[in-house]
Every structure is written in structure tokens, then in C-alpha cells.
Image (cartoon, grey):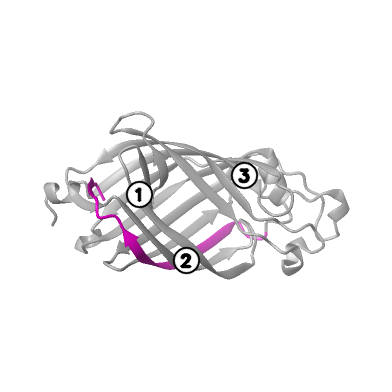
């Protein structure tokens, strides 16, 4: 096992920079019974500054000093959907890709003495906008979740696991964008539907990653339940469960010669 001193005082580069590629399987939207495979590039960027950090937990600034409370930036996204390629949305407008951004108040509930286990309550609120064509406000999302981080999983040095679970809530505008059916798009099999805001189901996610000397390797699996969601009766909801997964590899192209103490 790791000693407490070793775990909490590891010296890491101030910054690391690289580029990666991921293979992802996602449903067209939460509630769709159709999925697609994607191959997407992504930047690999880690910064371990005193007042600003960017790592696998996201981007965050130290706006106040506390071991128990952090104010972070929370990011999310949804992929575009070509309605002609999705049976439930035939002849409806396409879904544009969206990006979500907002603050997250993160509370540290418990940390093991050797720093290998950490339990947080995260309270992110994000505003969503469409990216393609005209930028459109598509409401907001609130997703409180418990997050457990484990370092050196099962004694395997360097492997990090994250386990996250919690409910989702969305505004009427957000649910309307994905689940409403306007009267002009109603058919015999797809009645008109006016989505309301509120509970949007729950989510469970597991991730696993390791930083090797020359590259980073990661994978995740996510399970969603839409049972009891405010929009579950929408004719666009074809499944009350959704599963997504992905793997990624990033090559580290450069790192700072300056070293800093890191809790990772």
C-alpha cells in the first residue's frame, strides 16, 4: 500500500499538454433507442497551479481557500442528431450540437488519511446553448451528484477510478428542445407533446484512467434511467434506459520542468 506521505506529496509537472483520440458509443439523445459510434479527437491538458487547475475533474479556480469547498467550472455537451437518420424524429428539425457551461459548488464530504479515497458532493448548474447555425438558448440543467475518487485501484499503482451517481433536473426550455413534438410534426404514431421542466431521470457513471510516462489511457461507462422523468411520456422517448461508453488514448507531447506537489 501507499504511505500517506507518498500519496499526498507526489511531485507532478505544473502543466502537461498532448492530443488524443476517443471512440465513443452514445444514444442519439437520452431516451432514444438508436445509438451511434463516434471517433473524436480531444486535447489533453493538465494544469496544477495554486489558483487555477485543469485536470480530469474539470476546470476550476480557487476563489476562496478551503479544504472542504471548491467552486469549479462544469462543462457538458450533446451530439447532433440528423432527424432523417432517427426513426422517432423523422421529418422533425435536426437536433443541433449543444454545449453546457456553468458553476459547480463542490463539497468534500470525506477523504481517507492516505488520500487514496475521496467522496465529494458536486452541485453543478449549467446553461445550454446550440453551437451550429444560430446560437440558441436551450435552457439549463442541474445535476447534483455524489462522486467517489479512488487512487491506485485494487493496489494497481497509478490507476484512478471515478464513480458518480445522482439525479438530473432540467428547465422547461431544455426538455422542450429534446422531447416536445409541435402540432405540425405530429403523426398517427407520434402525437403532439409539450414537455415540462423538472426531474429528468438519474445517471450512474464509472471511469478508469492511468497516466503512463508517454501517454494517458482512459475509459468510461454511463447508465441513465429516465423512469419518472417529467418528459417520459413523450413519443420521442423510446427507451427508459440509456447506455454510453467510450475509450480514449492521449499522447503527452510536452510537460513543464517545474514540479509541484499534487494530491493525485
Please name the predominant secondary structure of the magenta segment in the image.
strand
Inter-mark Cα distance, 3 to 1: 26 Å
Q: Tag 3 or tag 2, which sits nearer the N-term?
A: 3
Is 17 left or right of 139, judged from the image as shown?
A: left
Residue beneath the point at 49% across and 51% down = 203
Q: Is residue 245 found inside the magenta-colored segment of the image?
A: yes
Q: Residues within 10 Å of mark 2 (few under 14, many from 20)?
A: some
Residue 233 in the image: x percent, y percent? Answer: 70, 50
Q: Is residue 5 visible?
A: yes
Q: Quadrant of residue 63?
A: top left
Residue 202 in the image: x percent, y percent? Answer: 52, 48
* Stretch of the chain drawn in magenta: 238-264
Residue beneath the point at 43% across and 64% down = 19
Q: Looking at this rendering, what residue extends furthest in the right direction?
A: 184
Is 165 left or right of 175, judged from the image as shown?
A: left
Residue 128 tag number: 3
Do the CB atoms of the residues marked 2 and 3 lie less than 8 Å apart?
A: no
Amino acid at each position: 500500500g501507499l504511505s500517506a506521505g507518498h500519496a499526498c506529496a507526489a511531485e507532478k509537472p505544473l502543466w502537461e499538454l498532448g492530443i488524443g483520440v476517443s471512440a465513443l458509443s452514445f444514444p442519439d439523445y437520452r431516451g432514444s433507442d438508436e445509438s451511434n459510434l463516434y471517433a473524436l479527437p480531444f486535447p489533453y491538458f493538465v494544469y496544477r497551479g495554486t489558483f487555477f487547475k485543469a485536470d480530469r475533474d474539470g476546470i476550476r479556480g480557487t476563489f476562496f481557500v478551503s479544504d472542504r469547498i471548491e467552486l469549479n467550472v462544469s462543462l457538458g455537451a450533446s451530439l447532433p442528431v440528423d432527424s432523417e437518420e432517427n426513426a422517432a424524429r423523422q421529418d422533425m428539425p435536426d437536433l443541433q450540437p449543444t454545449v453546457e457551461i456553468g458553476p459547480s459548488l463542490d463539497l468534500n464530504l470525506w477523504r481517507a488519511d492516505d488520500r487514496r479515497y475521496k467522496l465529494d458532493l458536486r452541485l453543478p448548474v449549467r446553461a445550454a446553448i446550440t453551437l451550429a447555425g444560430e446560437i440558441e438558448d436551450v435552457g439549463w440543467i442541474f445535476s447534483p451528484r455524489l462522486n467517489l475518487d479512488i487512487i491506485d485501484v485494487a493496489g494497481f499503482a497509478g490507476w484512478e477510478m471515478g464513480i458518480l451517481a445522482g439525479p438530473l433536473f432540467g428547465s422547461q426550455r431544455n426538455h422542450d428542445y429534446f422531447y416536445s413534438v409541435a402540432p405540425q410534426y405530429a403523426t398517427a404514431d407520434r402525437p403532439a407533446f409539450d414537455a415540462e421542466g423538472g426531474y429528468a431521470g438519474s445517471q450512474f457513471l464509472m471511469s478508469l484512467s492511468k497516466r503512463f510516462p508517454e501517454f494517458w489511457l482512459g475509459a468510461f461507462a454511463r447508465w441513465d434511467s429516465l423512469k419518472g422523468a417529467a418528459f417520459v411520456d413523450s413519443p420521442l422517448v423510446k427507451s427508459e434506459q440509456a447506455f454510453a461508453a467510450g475509450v480514449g488514448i492521449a499522447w503527452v507531447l510536452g510537460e513543464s520542468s517545474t514540479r509541484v506537489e499534487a494530491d493525485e
